[in-house]
């Protein structure tokens, strides 16, 4: 099966690039937190044009800056949101609101199925809201102009984004005369973080939140995550799939370095891996492999299970090898072909940066500082996250340093159970333990209504994808548990509302 990693780069950023990668300590890109990427890699045809009749589009005249009173703060821009009325029971029926993340909402409308699968049960209105600075929701005109302007970039933050969502949801309730409709906010990955933070910051607007694969504890040493938290899970996924595959990958990095150091070594590696352009340095190949393994683990979902696909290629090649350096490289390349399919070339194809790559890099260089590095316990070369280098690189690129402690200052996170059980409520944190980002997720219940729903075999945001007849039973049960919890939230809300009206 074809799993081309790069085919859809012009549509939506598909590349998983790593913070301070084990093979390139100056890289500042933190792995994408996309709920849709895994599906699009497997099923690119799913990016069909969505029906404008089913999902009519609206634009809200959004305020640029919600937190200041300078004249420029009142500047307006058009923010896109899409609604689906198909199952809506009318005024005061529930609203399921999907909070967009680091991409256009176009892919969400076809890939995120949880809302459409759940809406009929609750006669709910569906709303998808686009994140500012992505898709068609760009202040100051073109994206290129905005991202080159330091002042314009300053309004590109998570706090501004969830304030946007608050304004739009209040606007919808007013426009459609549905003031008493309970709102459930839903998000995956970075959007899942936004959903949980929205519930904490705007409890008067949303009565609950489903936060899928949201690593809200991966900031500022909240959980003292082991040095290789993200990479430790990637390694575990591969080791469980095949011990020999894991060992081959672990041994391959030094082989690549050794071959690259020899006369014509880079040329030989370029031929061996059919690179699209000749390798200029070994790190180009190592970064590519690093990203490929991490993407496979993060989206290691049924029925194919990409980790198993890669290991199948590596192990099949191993059956006919003798164990020398060239054989190890043959095995690694066989894993690449098994995952990517037969392509004219691999590794460094031509690539124009997508809006997601550009936007997410700014977000991680400003506030979304997730300290991902690798230790000695992974199949990757050790490379601890170096905050000092990260800050220097970000400042070099953008003129300002990141704020690595801002997320926990603004949203909290430290001593989360001690704090949230005293004032928070109605949040589902769902995680699949095969997802590397689950190492920064909430995996235990915080209170009776802030709960963790986790699956041993789940991957990144798998519960948000459309239900299928071939879904494994554990996934069916995970979604059913989430719906049951939401059903209880709604029942409690309507009971309280009836009591309020009665009195």
Image (cartoon, grey):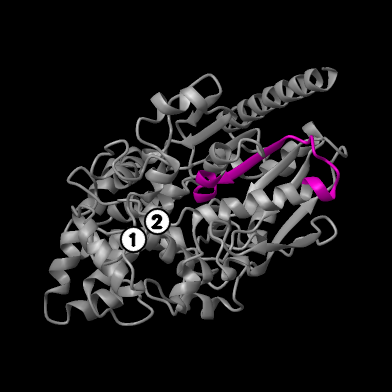
Mark pair 2, 1: CA separation: 6 Å
In front here: 369 or 40?
369
Taking the image as shown, residue 439 lies to the left or right of residue 355, namely left
Q: Is there any visible trace of residue 351 in the rendered image? A: no
Query: Horizontal and vertical percent for residue 294?
Result: 37, 53
Contact (Cβ within 8 Å) of mark 2 with mark 1: yes
In front here: 313 or 185?
185
Instruction: Give the label on residue 367, or none.
Output: 2
In front here: 311 or 443?
443
What segment carries the magenta color?
173-194
Residue depicted at 21% across the width and 78% down the height: 266
181 falls in the magenta region: yes
Query: Horizontal and vertical percent for residue 458?
Result: 49, 37
Estimate how packed mark 2 is, as few (under 14), some (14 to 19) or many (20 or more) residues with alpha carbons within 10 Å. Answer: some
Res. 463 image quadrant: top right
| Element on which disc 2 rests | loop
The residue where tag 1 is placed is: 402
Q: Is there any visible trace of residue 441 in the rendered image? A: yes
Q: Which of marks 2 and 1 is nearer the N terminus?
A: 2
Taking the image as shown, residue 191 lies to the left or right of residue 127, namely left
| Element on which disc 1 rests | loop
Estimate how packed mark 1 is, as few (under 14), some (14 to 19) or many (20 or more) residues with alpha carbons within 10 Å. Answer: many
Query: Horizontal and vertical percent for residue 178?
Result: 83, 40
- Residue at the farthest right position: 90
Residue depicted at 50% across the width and 54% down the height: 158
Residue depicted at 16% across the width and 70% down the height: 259
Up the image or down, 256 lies above or below 501; here it is below
Residue depicted at 51% across the width and 34% down the height: 429
Query: Horizontal and vertical percent for residue 184?
Result: 67, 37
């Amino acid at each position: 099966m074809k799993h081309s990693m790069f085919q859809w780069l012009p549509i939506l950023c598909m590349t998983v690039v790593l913070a301070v990668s084990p093979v390139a300590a100056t890289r500042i890109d933190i792995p994408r937190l996309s709920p849709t990427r895994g599906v699009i890699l497997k099923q690119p045809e799913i990016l069909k044009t969505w029906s404008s009749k089913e999902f009519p589009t609206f634009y809200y005249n959004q305020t640029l800056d919600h937190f200041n009173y300078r004249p420029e703060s009142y500047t307006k821009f058009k923010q896109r949101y899409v609604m689906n009325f198909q199952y809506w029971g009318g005024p005061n029926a529930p609203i399921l609101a999907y909070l967009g993340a680091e991409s256009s909402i176009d892919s969400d409308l076809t890939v995120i199925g949880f809302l459409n699968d759940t809406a009929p049960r609750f006669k709910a209105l569906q709303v998808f809201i686009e994140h500012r600075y992505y898709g068609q929701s760009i202040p100051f005109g073109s994206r290129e102009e905005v991202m080159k302007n330091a002042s314009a970039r300053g309004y590109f933050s998570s706090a501004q984004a969830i304030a946007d969502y608050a304004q739009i949801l209040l606007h919808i309730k007013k426009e459609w005369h549905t003031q008493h409709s309970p709102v459930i906010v839903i998000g995956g990955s970075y959007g899942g973080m936004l959903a949980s933070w929205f519930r904490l910051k705007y409890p008067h607007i949303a009565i609950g939140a489903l936060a899928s694969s949201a690593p809200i504890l991966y900031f500022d040493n909240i959980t003292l995550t082991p040095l290789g938290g993200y990479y430790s899970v990637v390694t575990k996924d591969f080791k469980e799939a095949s011990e020999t595959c894991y060992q081959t990958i672990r041994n391959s990095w030094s082989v690549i370095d050794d071959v690259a150091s020899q006369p014509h070594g880079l040329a030989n590696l370029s031929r061996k891996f059919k690179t699209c352009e000749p390798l200029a340095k070994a790190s180009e190949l190592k970064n590519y492999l690093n990203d490929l393994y991490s993407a496979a683990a993060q989206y290691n979902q049924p029925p194919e299970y990409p980790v198993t696909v890669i290991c199948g290629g590596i192990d099949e090649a191993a059956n006919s090898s003798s164990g020398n350096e060239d054989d190890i490289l043959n095995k690694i390349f066989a894993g690449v072909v098994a995952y990517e399919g037969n392509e004219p070339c691999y590794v460094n194809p031509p690539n124009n940066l997508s809006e997601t790559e550009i936007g997410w890099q700014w977000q991680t260089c400003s506030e979304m500082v997730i300290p991902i590095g690798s230790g000695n316990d992974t199949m990757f070369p050790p490379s601890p996250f170096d905050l000092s280098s990260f800050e220097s690189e970000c400042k070099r690129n953008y003129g300002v340093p990141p704020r690595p402690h801002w997320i926990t200052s603004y949203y909290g996170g430290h001593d989360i159970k001690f704090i949230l059980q005293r004032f928070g409520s109605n949040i589902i944190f769902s995680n699949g333990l095969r997802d590397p980002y689950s190492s920064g997720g909430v995996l235990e219940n915080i209170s009776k209504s802030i709960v963790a729903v986790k699956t041993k075999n789940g991957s990144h945001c798998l519960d948000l994808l459309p239900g299928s007849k071939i879904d494994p039973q554990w996934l069916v049960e995970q979604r059913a548990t989430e719906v049951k919890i939401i059903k209880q939230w709604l029942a409690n809300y309507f009971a309280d509302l009836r009591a309020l009206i009665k009195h």
